Image (spheres, helix red, strand yellow):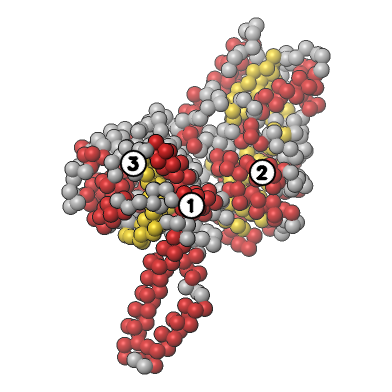
Amino acid sequence: MLEKIKNPTELKKLSLAELPVLTKEIRAKIVETVSKTGGHLASSLGAVELTIALHYCLDTPKDIIIWDVGHQTYAHKLITGRYENFSTLRQLGGISGFPSKDESDYDVFTTGHSSTAISLALGMAAARDIKGAKQKIVAVIGDGSLTGGLCFEALNNTGHLNKDILVILNTNEMSISPSVGALSNYLNKIISKPIYNRFREALQNFVKTRIPLVGSRMFKLAAKFEEVLKGLIIPGIFFEEFGFRYFGPLDGHNLELLINTLNNILSLKGPRILHVVTTKGKGYEPSENFPVQFHSAVPFEIDTGEIKLSTQNENLYSYTEVFSKKITELAQDNKKIVAITAAMPDGTGLYRFAEAFPERFFDVGIAEEHAICFAAGLAKNGLKPIAAIYSTFLQRAYDQIMEAISLQNLPVVLAIDRAGIVGGDGVTHQGIFDIAYLKSIPNFVLMAPKDLGELEAMLEFAVDINKPVAIRYPKTSEQLTKFSLAEKIKLGKSQILREGKDIALIALGSMVKPAMQAASDLAKENIDAAVINARFIKPLDEQLLKDLALRFKMIATLEEGIIDGGFGISILEKINQVCGEKELPKIIHFGLPTEFVTHGTREELLESAGLDKDSIAQKIKVFIKSSVVWQR
């Protein structure tokens, strides 16, 4: 049935009785594909019926669906013309794991970050009304989206403007990790109010003393009444204060109920919210039982849900794992260390810290702006906060980094995970801009380790120094290394790893290893390359740069970030500054272009950008033999 559906028009030819069969086919296709490619499994499995119901009731793409975050859209892709290419999910040259405006007219926005959908929908609704157009606009959000302040700003403004949009609130008690904060506990807290509990206790006493034979049964009914209060009355009051009409909650897996309700609600006007309750990972038992592990799954065995052996290597450790262990170790002795995550304790490795020091661990929800301001408050009052946030998500807190940390010169440590190329998640998740957007901020120390041992040493350094520090490290695994105590990290000091006379390769972080490999290959062709482990993006090692500029006629800079405004440009500017009137060396920059990088494996994308050892060696040979500077 599924492979015959090329677009939602053909979906509508199916009867309500046939749709449950389609849901099974969709789930089977999603599980089959993600078991090979990896991807966001649990959230997409949970949204299958909701996706079908929306396309069944709407006239897409004329009517608009905007998916918040977008990692729940695999069913959406399958019924909007991408079935035949679905096996290429997240692969180089294949379809994206998120909505992509360049991929389909049914994907209105390219999305990958949380809490944006209502704002986008409101903007489109306002434009629709100005143009006098007729179209229905739906924003689909999750309970995790409601932990982000942007979502509340949009709710407030939508209610104020009284615009005709429908918000679908899909709650499954999960965002990436269990939702946190006052909002997610709101419905439970209301039941603890004194007035409610006086009523509850009076009812309990009444059924026990007056009608003991049926008292137990009566009290079960009272407990059911409590659930009615939580699920029906209170949410409606909450959202109606924003100016929305509230409907639900509904069983998000009951297709007939969803379709009938949607048809009714879509005919209404003004701001509306339909609340559906779904099961994350629905239809695949391992994913239902372990939704966090299957949020962003690596390839797995379908029968058992176990990670495929080809992805495992006991001798390899990820930077996230080493960060996790080291920061927990440091906190044993330093009671001032506290840790902060924005709904990613597992992804950032802070789950280990949370288990060891629950009173010093804070998960603030999907609210990076708040996480940074919160960290500033902790630091101002004498603690040492370490905020672990993915590079792509740290972008959301740029102003807070500037105003709350830098301007106040507070000793907050930013552990920037997934810096550089991250692979399959694609354009919205590649962490390639952090060097450029952080290096211009005053007071910050910016660092990048060449290996796992150096990451541990940098964490020790960052905890000890009384300044704002950011450490960026990649999404990759490698052999565990030990840091040499003879090369203790000093502020702004680089490390010479290999002496040479023809060209100096100044490499940052993850680029040190391919630089060393390229130097070895160049040596076979009588090109003697020195290799410097920069360690610091800011401050730079001025004395070493001056020495290199005097010794070498050619210098190469290597970084896993955009070239424009990046590390290499800082090297160029600093050499210009320290050399004065002296003749400057020719400089070649290796890095990423200033554009959004597509999805594919990390290795494929680095090679396509010329950041693998073979490409580096080849371009350096051309650079040395040419009388003009190689143009990137």
Instruction: State the SS at label 3.
Output: loop
Q: Quadrant of the C terminus?
A: top right
Task: Name the amino acid type tagged 2.
Answer: Ile
Task: Return the residue at label 3.
Answer: 135
**Percent x, y of residue 316:** 54, 41
**Percent x, y of residue 83:** 28, 36
Task: Return the residue at label 1.
Answer: 160
- Determine the image quadrant of residue 560: top right
The residue nearer to you, when weighing 603 against 158, is 158
The residue nearer to you, when weighing 341 against 159, is 159
The residue nearer to you, when weighing 520 against 623, is 623
**Percent x, y of residue 347:** 52, 48
**Percent x, y of residue 384:** 71, 53
Q: Earlier in the sequence, mark 3 or mark 2?
A: 3
Q: CA distance from mark 3 to mark 2?
A: 40 Å
Q: Are marks 3 and 2 in contact (CB under 8 Å)?
A: no
Residue shown at the point (74%, 57%) measured from the top left: 381
Q: Is residue 572 visible?
A: yes
Q: Is residue 148 above or below residue 234?
A: above
Task: Name the amino acid type tagged 3.
Answer: Gln
Q: Is residue 311 visible?
A: no
Task: Name the amino acid type tagged 1.
Answer: His
Task: Return the residue at label 2.
Answer: 401
Q: Quadrant of the N terminus?
A: top left
Mark 3 nearby-residue class (10 Å; few <14, some 14–19, many ≥20): some
